[in-house]
Image (spheres, helix red, strand yellow):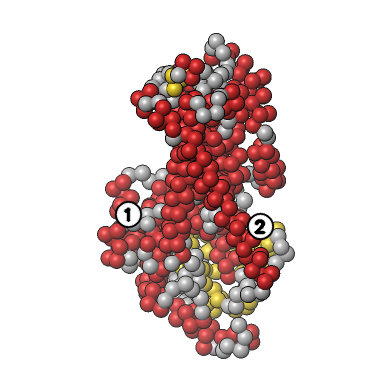
Amino acid sequence: MKRSEKIITNTVKIAGSSSILFILLIFVFLVREGLPALGEVSLKDLFSLRWYPIEDLFGLLPLISGSLVVTFTSILIAVPLGIGTAIYIGEIAPKNVKEILKPTVEIMAGIPSVVLGFIGIQALSPFLREFFNLPTGLTALSGSILLAMIAIPSIVSIAEDALYAVPSSYRDASYALGATKWQTIWGVVLPAARNGLMTAVMLGIGRSLGETMAVMMVTGNAATTFSGLKSVIMPVRTMTATIASEMGEVASGSVHYHVLFFIGIILFIFSLVINISSTSVQGKSKQEKGQVIS
Amino acid sequence: MTEPKIRIRDLYLRYSDGKEALKGINLDIQPNQITVAFGPSGGGKSSLVKVLNRLIDLSDVEEMHGEVTMGDLNILDKNLDVVGLRRRIGVVFSRPIPLPLTIFQNISFGLEVAGMRDQKMLHERVEKALREAVLWDEIYDRLDDPAASISGGQQQRLCLARVLALEPEVILLDEPTSALDPVSTAKIEEFLEIAKKDYTILLVPHNQQQAARMADQAAFFLQGELVEYTDGESMFINPRDKRTQDYVQGRFG
């Protein structure tokens, strides 16, 4: 092989493997800083209901439930809107509307989350406070709505790709059998794009779970215990917001410090599970497509 | 001759890219016969098929005029109930396109979108259609498998069965055997020979041998024109037009 070829190949190889190296480094670092928490705080205390680090109460359940409530509610909002938008852009909208809508959604993806958070504090929270007649508008719901705005663009673009990948011959065949447009979308296009749509949802979940800034600004940041449906309109504190707001003032190497990294490990595992399940869904879709071709 | 099933008069079609697909076609499609539309590709056969069940609505058409009628029904009517039309005029495409559903659902789909909900009736119609398309014996025990899991030849008969399930009056087949092996092709052809007593059939054959085998009536299409239209025997043994002669005898095409 020529020398220049060799250099290029190796450069690309290093670039490619570096991302794996980074992930590994991050994981090693997380484990090294976070795992000692298990020795310093008993499991029973870690999974208790009270997060009050000043009094050495490190119950993580309120934070985990906070993250889950916010993420779940945001997905409930984002999935119908996102998938609906994708269906409209991909299947229904006339060409010129589509040409306006698609870039608009992409611009939405570019809005910094801190800007959304600001809008959330100034406009959304006061509205929610009055609408639900609450003591404060800084609630899980405010965070969920902002997170939905953040998740929608990714859901839309991936879902739209999935719809686009459905061969138009399916639509023709459906129309030829006397189906209407909506019957074709519902009965043929959506089932055919099912796996891609699942990936879109998974990515939306990942996006919501990991988002920090917007959530920290509008959810009120009180580590409240999960109390059913009511949690949605109560202030909550998410795992990400806890790390972000407390990491700056904690003494390096203290118990509190280790517990914060332990939260990082939990987040890491959550997003790992989401990523793995979304790639396994994708893998399955490839197998099925293979069958269609053969 | 009997009253034609479909009458086509001066049918003209131009796509948005400027291509004239049909340049004034006059054609009577007879009931209970196999009408074969053949000729080199780009002759307008597929466009004709699309016009007849209005799948042409999905293409970018710049200009279309003329007269296409089935009985009292004006097929080119802008306000026509195309959904209803497509149930009366079914189409089988050149490649088997099973919908990404189960075998059963592929056939029941057309019935369900037409409003049939009764499970027992659906089952009866599905079985009847599968038997008619000579597929029932091969797949009756895996109706809930994905339609993509059966062979290409079976898939094409499945596509035929789902058209038959709607009990159409006319069946259009656009090169239905071009993706099939000879055995599967023979099965489709056998079916067509039997089915013509119940249906009006327009077949775009995928080669001239098939055209000669199947044609009761034959229409030779060349670059958007209908060059010659006569019964199958005259067409392939004693064509009148010079261009038909040249094509049938293999001098071009």
Residue A290 visible, this orientation: yes
Q: Residues within 10 Å of mark 2 (few under 14, many from 20)?
A: few
Please tell me which residue is depicted at 68% across the width and 38% down the height of the picture: A110
Residue B206 location in percent, x, y? Answer: 51, 76
Q: Residues within 10 Å of mark 1 (few under 14, many from 20)?
A: few
Please tell me which residue is depicted at 44% across the width and 19% down the height of the picture: A57
Foreground residue among B116 and A49: A49
State the SS at label 1: loop
Please give the chain letter of the residue carrying mark 1: B
Residue B9 location in percent, x, y? Answer: 62, 65
Q: Based on the displayed image, in which of its 4 quarters is residue A8 positioned? A: bottom right
Label disc, if present, on residue B60 of the rendered structure:
2
Please tell me which residue is depicted at 60% across the width and 45% down the height of the picture: A157
Foreground residue among B131 and B12: B131
Q: Amino acid at mark 1?
A: Asp
Seen from this angle, which residue lies furthest right? B18
Q: Based on the displayed image, in which of its 4 quarters is residue A2 positioned? A: bottom right
Q: Which of pointers 1 and 2 lies earlier in the amino acid sequence?
A: 2
Q: Amino acid at mark 2?
A: Asp
Left or right for B189, reference A93: left
